[in-house]
Amino acid sequence: MTQAAFVERRSGTWQSLDALLRRVERRGTRALSPDEIFELGRLYRATTSDLAYAQGADYDRALLEYLNRSVARAHAHVYAKAPESGMRRIAEFYARAFPQEFRRSLPYVAVCTALTVACAVVAYVLVRSHPADAYALLPKFLVSEKIRKSLHDSKFAVDPGFAPAMSALIIANNVKVAIVAFAGSVTLGALTLYIIASNGVMLGGMGALFTNAGFGADFWATIAPHGVIELTAIQIAGAAGLLIAAAIVHPGRMRRRDLIVINARRAGTLILGVASMLIVAGTIEAFVSPLRLPETVRIGVGIFTAILLILYFSGAGRRSSLPREHGPREETA
């Protein structure tokens, strides 16, 4: 068959496929009726056969390129993954994307955690040995001449009816700290590390002040229920900031711009997870931490949340992995 005869006989099929594809590309496959979806598949298969015939007959290159483009366009829609519902995408994020990205970014999380622990220990030792050092290490409003009440009595001596408003305030403050730690990437990570270090100093310094006043056990028991989640979230936020800073400072063999885009996506996954964690921590801090529970029970709640976090971040999403991207650590989940 000559090329002209072939085109005359089959061009109607190609034009019908092109018309359907233009509709799908403008409005999606949901714009098609069931019969039209069936027709799209039929036209795709027919055009695929025409392409194979034209290649075998060694027809003009322009015709082959036209058919090849039509087949490629149709293939993208015929074999496209069915769109997921909003709830399924949310479930997929928490079940796979967030914990997998946490494990990929673990070196950065470890840096932030080590810095927090080191600063907390140093501040605790200094203030325990020389209480006056608290004035140099902590903001003035956190240092009292004389601590007369435990942290639980001083912080949560409010009407339980204010718990919802208190929860919103706590969540907003924690999110602000996390955002600053993340935004520190624009300072090549310097501000991120400063925020993480300051948070550790405040934790250790305040712990030492209350311990010096005889309320040490209550201090740690008071922050335990919400603090494990809250502190973990802040370390992850810091890791997100360091991810972007690392792409700027040391892109390796990749173009700096490309790695910034890749790491920004990864950091975005971490920050979305951090926001959720801070909502949970703020809710616990407003509704659970103020309860007059024994110190052992409050510490037990903190240990329980720590175990849950370890199980979640170490085990969730192990059966499948995210698309592999350039980063400091790759994981086969």
Image (tube, rainbow, N blue to C red):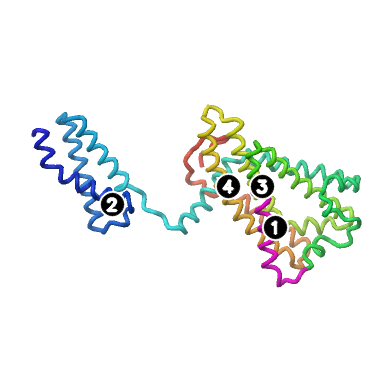
- Label 1 – label 4 distance at C-alpha: 19 Å
Queried whether the magenta region covers residue 162, the answer comes back as: yes
- Label 4 – label 3 distance at C-alpha: 14 Å
In the image, which is nearer the foreground, mark 3 or mark 1? 3
Pinpoint residue 231: horizontal percent, then vertical percent. 69, 50
Q: Quadrant location of residue 241?
A: top right
Pinpoint residue 181: horizontal percent, then vertical percent. 66, 45
In the image, which is nearer the foreground, mark 4 or mark 3? 3
For marks 1 and 4 on the same chain, the one whose residue lies earlier in the sequence: 1
- Helix, strand, or loop for circle 4? helix
Residue highlighted by disc 4: 270
Residue highlighted by disc 2: 23
User: Tag 4: Cα neighbours inside 10 Å, few (<14), some, or many (≥20)?
Assistant: many
- Label 3 – label 1 distance at C-alpha: 20 Å
Q: In the picture provided, is 262 more to the left or to the right than 135?
A: left
Q: Amino acid at mark 3?
A: Val
Q: Amino acid at mark 1?
A: His
Magenta stretch in the rendered image: 158-181
For the residues labelled 4 and 3, say whether their Cβ atoms are less than 8 Å apart.
no
- Label 3 – label 2 distance at C-alpha: 45 Å
